[in-house]
Image: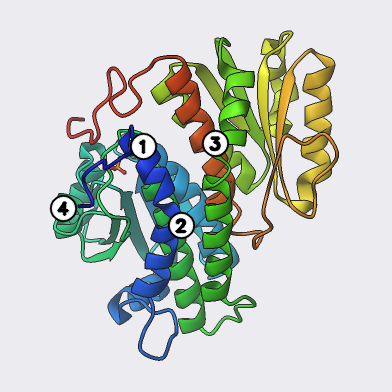
Amino acid sequence: SDIEKGTYPHYMLKEIDEQPAVMRKIIQAYQNEAGELSIDADILEAINASDRLYIIAAGTSYHAGLVGKEYFEKITKKPVEVHISSEFGYNMPILSEKPLFVFISQSGETADSRQVLVKIKEMGHKALTVTNVQGSTLSREADFTLLLHAGPEIAVASTKAYVAQIAVLAVAATVAAKHAGHDVEFDLIKELGIVANAVQAMVDSKEAIEAIAKDFLATTRNAFFIGRNVDFFVSLEGALKLKEISYIQAEGFAGGELKHGTIALIEDGTPVFALVTQKPVALNIRGNVKEVVARGAKPCIISMEGMEEDGDTLVIPNVHSLLTPLVSVIPLQLISYYAALHRDCDVDKPRNLAKSVTVE
Ligand code: AGP
Protein backbone atom coordinates (compact mmCIF):
# COMPACT_ATOMS: atom_id res chain seq x y z
CA SER A 1 0.00 0.00 0.00
CA ASP A 2 0.87 3.69 -0.10
CA ILE A 3 2.13 3.72 3.45
CA GLU A 4 4.50 0.76 3.20
CA LYS A 5 8.19 1.31 2.53
CA GLY A 6 8.42 -1.74 0.29
CA THR A 7 11.99 -2.25 -0.83
CA TYR A 8 13.00 1.31 0.05
CA PRO A 9 15.41 1.86 2.95
CA HIS A 10 13.56 5.04 3.93
CA TYR A 11 10.20 6.67 3.40
CA MET A 12 11.97 9.84 2.35
CA LEU A 13 13.60 8.16 -0.64
CA LYS A 14 10.33 6.50 -1.61
CA GLU A 15 8.50 9.81 -1.39
CA ILE A 16 11.18 11.57 -3.47
CA ASP A 17 10.76 8.88 -6.12
CA GLU A 18 6.98 9.32 -6.14
CA GLN A 19 7.21 12.93 -7.27
CA PRO A 20 6.86 12.39 -11.05
CA ALA A 21 3.70 10.36 -10.36
CA VAL A 22 2.40 13.08 -8.03
CA MET A 23 2.81 15.65 -10.82
CA ARG A 24 0.84 13.43 -13.20
CA LYS A 25 -1.82 12.74 -10.59
CA ILE A 26 -2.37 16.47 -10.06
CA ILE A 27 -2.70 17.11 -13.81
CA GLN A 28 -5.33 14.36 -13.89
CA ALA A 29 -7.17 15.30 -10.70
CA TYR A 30 -7.64 18.92 -11.73
CA GLN A 31 -8.81 18.22 -15.28
CA ASN A 32 -12.49 18.39 -16.29
CA GLU A 33 -14.25 16.28 -18.90
CA ALA A 34 -13.25 18.74 -21.63
CA GLY A 35 -9.61 18.12 -20.74
CA GLU A 36 -9.14 21.59 -19.28
CA LEU A 37 -7.77 22.44 -15.86
CA SER A 38 -10.54 23.31 -13.46
CA ILE A 39 -11.23 23.93 -9.77
CA ASP A 40 -14.50 24.40 -7.86
CA ALA A 41 -16.48 27.42 -9.02
CA ASP A 42 -16.91 28.58 -5.38
CA ILE A 43 -13.13 28.71 -4.96
CA LEU A 44 -12.66 30.62 -8.21
CA GLU A 45 -15.28 33.12 -7.16
CA ALA A 46 -13.71 33.52 -3.71
CA ILE A 47 -10.28 34.14 -5.24
CA ASN A 48 -11.53 36.61 -7.80
CA ALA A 49 -13.87 38.40 -5.37
CA SER A 50 -10.97 39.07 -3.01
CA ASP A 51 -8.65 42.03 -3.40
CA ARG A 52 -5.67 40.32 -1.76
CA LEU A 53 -4.63 36.80 -0.79
CA TYR A 54 -2.98 36.14 2.57
CA ILE A 55 -1.02 32.90 2.43
CA ILE A 56 -0.40 31.47 5.91
CA ALA A 57 1.91 28.49 6.50
CA ALA A 58 4.90 27.07 8.37
CA GLY A 59 8.20 25.44 7.39
CA THR A 60 8.29 23.82 3.98
CA SER A 61 4.67 24.82 3.33
CA TYR A 62 5.69 28.46 3.90
CA HIS A 63 8.43 28.00 1.30
CA ALA A 64 5.84 26.66 -1.16
CA GLY A 65 3.69 29.71 -0.34
CA LEU A 66 6.50 32.03 -1.40
CA VAL A 67 6.46 30.41 -4.85
CA GLY A 68 2.63 30.52 -4.85
CA LYS A 69 2.75 34.31 -4.41
CA GLU A 70 4.70 34.53 -7.69
CA TYR A 71 1.94 32.58 -9.45
CA PHE A 72 -0.97 34.62 -8.16
CA GLU A 73 0.79 37.91 -8.79
CA LYS A 74 2.31 37.10 -12.21
CA ILE A 75 -0.46 34.92 -13.67
CA THR A 76 -3.62 36.05 -11.84
CA LYS A 77 -2.50 39.68 -11.23
CA LYS A 78 -3.69 39.33 -7.63
CA PRO A 79 -1.71 40.94 -4.79
CA VAL A 80 -0.47 38.37 -2.27
CA GLU A 81 1.19 38.44 1.14
CA VAL A 82 2.86 35.36 2.58
CA HIS A 83 3.08 35.02 6.36
CA ILE A 84 4.60 32.55 8.81
CA SER A 85 1.66 31.26 10.88
CA SER A 86 3.34 31.62 14.27
CA GLU A 87 4.13 35.29 13.60
CA PHE A 88 0.76 36.31 12.20
CA GLY A 89 -1.15 36.42 15.50
CA TYR A 90 0.84 39.25 17.05
CA ASN A 91 2.29 40.69 13.88
CA MET A 92 -0.92 41.00 11.89
CA PRO A 93 -0.63 43.34 8.91
CA ILE A 94 -3.33 45.90 8.15
CA LEU A 95 -5.73 43.77 6.14
CA SER A 96 -7.18 44.76 2.78
CA GLU A 97 -10.92 45.28 2.40
CA LYS A 98 -11.68 41.86 0.93
CA PRO A 99 -9.00 39.44 2.07
CA LEU A 100 -9.02 35.72 1.26
CA PHE A 101 -6.86 33.57 3.54
CA VAL A 102 -5.04 30.63 1.99
CA PHE A 103 -3.69 28.08 4.48
CA ILE A 104 -1.05 25.74 3.11
CA SER A 105 -0.49 22.66 5.23
CA GLN A 106 0.51 19.13 4.26
CA SER A 107 -1.01 17.63 7.41
CA GLY A 108 -3.80 20.14 7.92
CA GLU A 109 -3.05 19.87 11.63
CA THR A 110 -0.37 22.49 12.29
CA ALA A 111 -1.41 24.29 15.49
CA ASP A 112 0.22 27.61 14.58
CA SER A 113 -1.80 27.75 11.38
CA ARG A 114 -5.01 26.64 13.06
CA GLN A 115 -4.68 29.45 15.59
CA VAL A 116 -4.66 31.97 12.72
CA LEU A 117 -7.61 30.25 11.04
CA VAL A 118 -9.70 30.46 14.22
CA LYS A 119 -8.83 34.13 14.59
CA ILE A 120 -9.61 35.20 11.02
CA LYS A 121 -12.89 33.23 11.05
CA GLU A 122 -13.88 35.15 14.19
CA MET A 123 -13.15 38.32 12.25
CA GLY A 124 -15.58 37.09 9.55
CA HIS A 125 -13.06 36.35 6.79
CA LYS A 126 -13.06 33.46 4.34
CA ALA A 127 -10.43 30.74 4.17
CA LEU A 128 -9.17 28.21 1.64
CA THR A 129 -7.01 25.32 2.87
CA VAL A 130 -4.54 23.62 0.54
CA THR A 131 -3.78 20.29 2.17
CA ASN A 132 -2.83 16.68 1.61
CA VAL A 133 -5.29 15.36 4.18
CA GLN A 134 -8.98 15.38 3.44
CA GLY A 135 -11.00 15.89 6.63
CA SER A 136 -8.03 17.38 8.51
CA THR A 137 -8.70 20.15 11.03
CA LEU A 138 -7.61 22.99 8.74
CA SER A 139 -9.71 21.55 5.94
CA ARG A 140 -12.84 21.13 8.07
CA GLU A 141 -12.61 24.58 9.60
CA ALA A 142 -11.99 26.47 6.35
CA ASP A 143 -14.66 27.42 3.81
CA PHE A 144 -12.89 25.67 0.93
CA THR A 145 -10.29 22.98 0.38
CA LEU A 146 -7.90 22.13 -2.45
CA LEU A 147 -6.32 18.69 -2.12
CA LEU A 148 -2.70 17.95 -2.94
CA HIS A 149 -3.24 14.35 -4.09
CA ALA A 150 0.32 13.48 -3.04
CA GLY A 151 -0.61 10.34 -1.09
CA PRO A 152 0.43 9.90 2.57
CA GLU A 153 3.71 11.57 3.44
CA ILE A 154 5.40 9.69 6.29
CA ALA A 155 9.00 10.98 6.40
CA VAL A 156 9.38 14.00 8.69
CA ALA A 157 11.19 15.86 5.90
CA SER A 158 8.53 17.03 3.48
CA THR A 159 9.33 16.37 -0.19
CA LYS A 160 6.41 15.33 -2.37
CA ALA A 161 4.00 17.60 -0.50
CA TYR A 162 6.17 20.62 -1.40
CA VAL A 163 6.06 19.93 -5.14
CA ALA A 164 2.35 19.10 -4.89
CA GLN A 165 1.66 22.40 -3.10
CA ILE A 166 3.49 24.37 -5.77
CA ALA A 167 1.77 22.52 -8.62
CA VAL A 168 -1.70 22.93 -7.09
CA LEU A 169 -1.06 26.65 -6.49
CA ALA A 170 0.00 26.96 -10.15
CA VAL A 171 -3.24 25.28 -11.21
CA ALA A 172 -5.37 27.52 -8.97
CA ALA A 173 -3.58 30.68 -10.13
CA THR A 174 -3.93 29.74 -13.80
CA VAL A 175 -7.59 28.72 -13.64
CA ALA A 176 -8.41 31.86 -11.60
CA ALA A 177 -6.59 34.01 -14.17
CA LYS A 178 -8.68 32.58 -17.01
CA HIS A 179 -11.85 32.98 -14.95
CA ALA A 180 -10.96 36.64 -14.39
CA GLY A 181 -10.44 37.12 -18.14
CA HIS A 182 -6.65 37.46 -18.10
CA ASP A 183 -4.57 36.08 -20.97
CA VAL A 184 -2.55 33.06 -19.92
CA GLU A 185 0.25 32.53 -22.39
CA PHE A 186 1.16 28.99 -21.47
CA ASP A 187 -0.56 25.63 -21.50
CA LEU A 188 -0.13 24.47 -17.90
CA ILE A 189 -1.16 20.87 -18.60
CA LYS A 190 1.58 20.63 -21.20
CA GLU A 191 4.15 22.45 -19.03
CA LEU A 192 3.43 20.26 -15.98
CA GLY A 193 3.85 17.20 -18.21
CA ILE A 194 7.29 18.50 -19.17
CA VAL A 195 7.99 19.06 -15.45
CA ALA A 196 6.97 15.48 -14.61
CA ASN A 197 9.54 14.17 -17.11
CA ALA A 198 12.21 16.53 -15.79
CA VAL A 199 11.50 15.42 -12.20
CA GLN A 200 11.83 11.82 -13.40
CA ALA A 201 15.22 12.63 -14.97
CA MET A 202 16.36 14.08 -11.63
CA VAL A 203 15.24 11.13 -9.50
CA ASP A 204 17.01 8.91 -12.04
CA SER A 205 20.26 10.82 -11.41
CA LYS A 206 20.71 9.48 -7.87
CA GLU A 207 24.25 8.22 -8.40
CA ALA A 208 25.54 11.58 -9.59
CA ILE A 209 23.67 13.38 -6.80
CA GLU A 210 24.92 11.00 -4.12
CA ALA A 211 28.46 11.71 -5.34
CA ILE A 212 27.80 15.45 -4.94
CA ALA A 213 26.53 14.91 -1.39
CA LYS A 214 29.65 12.91 -0.48
CA ASP A 215 31.97 15.39 -2.11
CA PHE A 216 30.45 18.54 -0.58
CA LEU A 217 28.85 17.48 2.66
CA ALA A 218 30.60 14.42 4.13
CA THR A 219 32.45 16.34 6.84
CA THR A 220 31.45 20.01 6.61
CA ARG A 221 29.87 21.77 9.58
CA ASN A 222 27.97 24.31 7.50
CA ALA A 223 26.64 24.99 4.01
CA PHE A 224 25.01 27.83 2.11
CA PHE A 225 22.33 27.92 -0.56
CA ILE A 226 21.97 30.96 -2.79
CA GLY A 227 19.60 31.99 -5.54
CA ARG A 228 17.69 34.96 -6.87
CA ASN A 229 13.97 35.33 -7.55
CA VAL A 230 12.26 31.90 -7.22
CA ASP A 231 15.70 30.29 -6.88
CA PHE A 232 15.98 32.17 -3.58
CA PHE A 233 12.79 30.49 -2.30
CA VAL A 234 14.12 27.07 -3.33
CA SER A 235 17.40 27.90 -1.55
CA LEU A 236 15.43 28.38 1.68
CA GLU A 237 13.86 24.97 1.21
CA GLY A 238 17.19 23.31 0.36
CA ALA A 239 18.73 24.71 3.54
CA LEU A 240 15.78 23.61 5.71
CA LYS A 241 15.93 20.10 4.28
CA LEU A 242 19.64 19.80 4.97
CA LYS A 243 19.33 21.18 8.53
CA GLU A 244 16.50 18.96 9.60
CA ILE A 245 17.87 15.60 8.52
CA SER A 246 21.66 15.97 8.40
CA TYR A 247 22.08 18.52 11.27
CA ILE A 248 24.49 20.50 9.11
CA GLN A 249 24.08 24.19 9.86
CA ALA A 250 22.69 25.59 6.62
CA GLU A 251 21.43 28.93 5.44
CA GLY A 252 19.53 29.87 2.30
CA PHE A 253 19.55 33.44 1.16
CA ALA A 254 19.19 35.82 -1.73
CA GLY A 255 22.40 36.09 -3.77
CA GLY A 256 22.34 39.87 -3.50
CA GLU A 257 22.40 39.68 0.31
CA LEU A 258 25.84 38.02 0.41
CA LYS A 259 27.70 41.30 0.48
CA HIS A 260 25.44 42.59 3.26
CA GLY A 261 26.86 40.19 5.81
CA THR A 262 26.80 36.48 5.11
CA ILE A 263 29.93 36.53 2.95
CA ALA A 264 31.91 37.04 6.18
CA LEU A 265 31.20 33.38 6.99
CA ILE A 266 32.83 31.99 3.84
CA GLU A 267 36.04 30.09 4.60
CA ASP A 268 38.27 27.73 2.67
CA GLY A 269 36.13 24.85 1.46
CA THR A 270 32.71 26.17 2.63
CA PRO A 271 30.10 24.50 0.39
CA VAL A 272 27.91 26.99 -1.48
CA PHE A 273 25.03 25.60 -3.52
CA ALA A 274 23.95 28.09 -6.20
CA LEU A 275 20.79 27.77 -8.30
CA VAL A 276 20.81 29.23 -11.80
CA THR A 277 17.40 28.72 -13.44
CA GLN A 278 16.24 32.31 -13.99
CA LYS A 279 17.63 33.93 -17.14
CA PRO A 280 17.15 37.59 -16.14
CA VAL A 281 19.33 37.12 -13.04
CA ALA A 282 21.69 34.37 -14.24
CA LEU A 283 24.63 36.74 -14.65
CA ASN A 284 24.07 38.23 -11.20
CA ILE A 285 24.01 34.88 -9.41
CA ARG A 286 27.07 33.71 -11.34
CA GLY A 287 28.73 36.93 -10.15
CA ASN A 288 27.86 35.94 -6.57
CA VAL A 289 29.46 32.55 -7.13
CA LYS A 290 32.67 34.28 -8.25
CA GLU A 291 32.60 36.41 -5.08
CA VAL A 292 32.39 33.39 -2.77
CA VAL A 293 34.94 31.40 -4.78
CA ALA A 294 37.37 34.31 -4.40
CA ARG A 295 37.00 33.82 -0.62
CA GLY A 296 37.68 30.08 -0.78
CA ALA A 297 34.17 28.63 -1.12
CA LYS A 298 33.58 25.30 -2.81
CA PRO A 299 30.73 26.01 -5.27
CA CYS A 300 28.12 23.53 -6.42
CA ILE A 301 26.33 25.16 -9.34
CA ILE A 302 22.96 23.71 -10.31
CA SER A 303 21.87 25.37 -13.55
CA MET A 304 19.13 24.79 -16.07
CA GLU A 305 19.64 23.46 -19.57
CA GLY A 306 19.95 26.43 -21.93
CA MET A 307 21.91 28.52 -19.43
CA GLU A 308 24.54 25.99 -18.34
CA GLU A 309 28.26 26.80 -18.46
CA ASP A 310 31.38 24.67 -18.37
CA GLY A 311 32.15 23.67 -14.83
CA ASP A 312 28.53 23.57 -13.60
CA THR A 313 28.04 20.67 -11.19
CA LEU A 314 24.57 19.57 -12.29
CA VAL A 315 22.22 20.66 -15.08
CA ILE A 316 18.46 20.25 -14.69
CA PRO A 317 16.26 19.81 -17.78
CA ASN A 318 14.65 22.93 -19.24
CA VAL A 319 11.15 23.72 -17.96
CA HIS A 320 8.93 26.84 -17.95
CA SER A 321 10.64 29.60 -15.96
CA LEU A 322 7.79 29.81 -13.42
CA LEU A 323 7.90 26.07 -12.75
CA THR A 324 11.64 25.59 -12.12
CA PRO A 325 11.20 25.14 -8.32
CA LEU A 326 9.42 21.83 -9.01
CA VAL A 327 12.59 20.50 -10.62
CA SER A 328 15.48 22.34 -8.93
CA VAL A 329 14.31 21.22 -5.49
CA ILE A 330 14.72 17.52 -6.39
CA PRO A 331 18.55 17.45 -6.39
CA LEU A 332 18.50 19.46 -3.14
CA GLN A 333 16.19 16.88 -1.52
CA LEU A 334 18.45 14.06 -2.70
CA ILE A 335 21.62 15.88 -1.63
CA SER A 336 20.12 16.22 1.89
CA TYR A 337 19.03 12.60 1.90
CA TYR A 338 22.49 11.28 0.97
CA ALA A 339 24.26 13.73 3.28
CA ALA A 340 22.14 12.45 6.19
CA LEU A 341 22.69 8.84 5.15
CA HIS A 342 26.47 9.19 4.97
CA ARG A 343 26.55 11.02 8.30
CA ASP A 344 24.59 8.16 9.91
CA CYS A 345 21.57 10.26 10.75
CA ASP A 346 18.07 8.87 11.19
CA VAL A 347 16.68 10.09 7.86
CA ASP A 348 12.97 9.46 8.43
CA LYS A 349 12.85 10.45 12.10
CA PRO A 350 15.34 13.22 12.76
CA ARG A 351 16.02 14.16 16.38
CA ASN A 352 13.80 16.76 18.09
CA LEU A 353 11.23 16.83 15.26
CA ALA A 354 7.65 15.61 14.81
CA LYS A 355 5.85 15.10 11.50
CA SER A 356 3.09 17.50 12.40
CA VAL A 357 3.52 20.17 14.99
CA THR A 358 0.24 20.14 16.87
CA VAL A 359 1.40 22.39 19.73
CA GLU A 360 1.89 26.16 19.48
C1 AGP B 1 9.28 20.02 6.48
O1 AGP B 1 10.30 19.23 6.03
C2 AGP B 1 9.11 20.13 7.92
N1 AGP B 1 9.21 18.92 8.64
C3 AGP B 1 8.15 21.18 8.45
O2 AGP B 1 8.79 22.40 8.19
C4 AGP B 1 6.70 21.25 7.92
O3 AGP B 1 6.70 21.65 6.59
C5 AGP B 1 5.91 22.23 8.81
O4 AGP B 1 5.86 21.74 10.13
C6 AGP B 1 4.51 22.48 8.29
O5 AGP B 1 3.73 21.32 8.31
P1 AGP B 1 2.35 21.24 7.56
O6 AGP B 1 2.61 21.47 6.12
O7 AGP B 1 1.82 19.88 7.86
O8 AGP B 1 1.47 22.34 8.14
From this viewpoint, is residue 356 visible? yes
Query: Residue flagged by tag 3: what amino acid is it?
Result: Leu
Q: Position of residue 257 (x, y in %)?
A: 69, 29
Question: Which circle, 4 or 2, is nearer the viewer?
Answer: 2
In terms of sequence position, does the residue under pointer 4 or pointer 3 come before the other? Answer: 4
Query: Residue flagged by tag 2: what amino acid is it?
Result: Pro
In terms of sequence position, does the residue under pointer 1 or pointer 3 come before the other? Answer: 1
Residue 155 as seen in the image, left or right of residue 335: left
Q: Is mark 3 within 8 Å of ligand 1?
A: no
In terms of sequence position, does the residue under pointer 2 or pointer 3 come before the other? Answer: 2
Specify few, some or many for label 4: CA neighbours under 10 Å numbering under 14, 14-19, or 20 or more: some
The CA span between labels 4 and 3 is 29 Å
Query: Residue flagged by tag 1: what amino acid is it?
Result: Met
Q: In the rendered image of this protein, does residue 93 appear above or below residue 340? A: below
Residue 188 as seen in the image, left or right of residue 266: left
The residue singled out by tag 3 in the image is 332
Q: Position of residue 352 (x, y in %)?
A: 27, 18
Query: Residue flagged by tag 4: what amino acid is it?
Result: Ser
The residue at the point 23 percent across, 51 percent down is: 2
Specify few, some or many for label 2: CA neighbours under 10 Å numbering under 14, 14-19, or 20 or more: many
The residue tagged with tag 2: helix, strand or loop? helix
Image marks 2 and 3: residues in contact by CB distance under 8 Å: no
The residue at the point 54 percent across, 38 percent down is: 206
The residue singled out by tag 4 in the image is 136
The CA span between labels 1 and 3 is 13 Å
The residue tagged with tag 1: helix, strand or loop? helix
- What kind of colouring is applied to the model shown? rainbow
The CA span between labels 2 and 3 is 16 Å
Residue 265 is drawn in which quadrant? top right
The residue singled out by tag 2 in the image is 20
Name, please, the residue furthest toward the front. Answer: 7
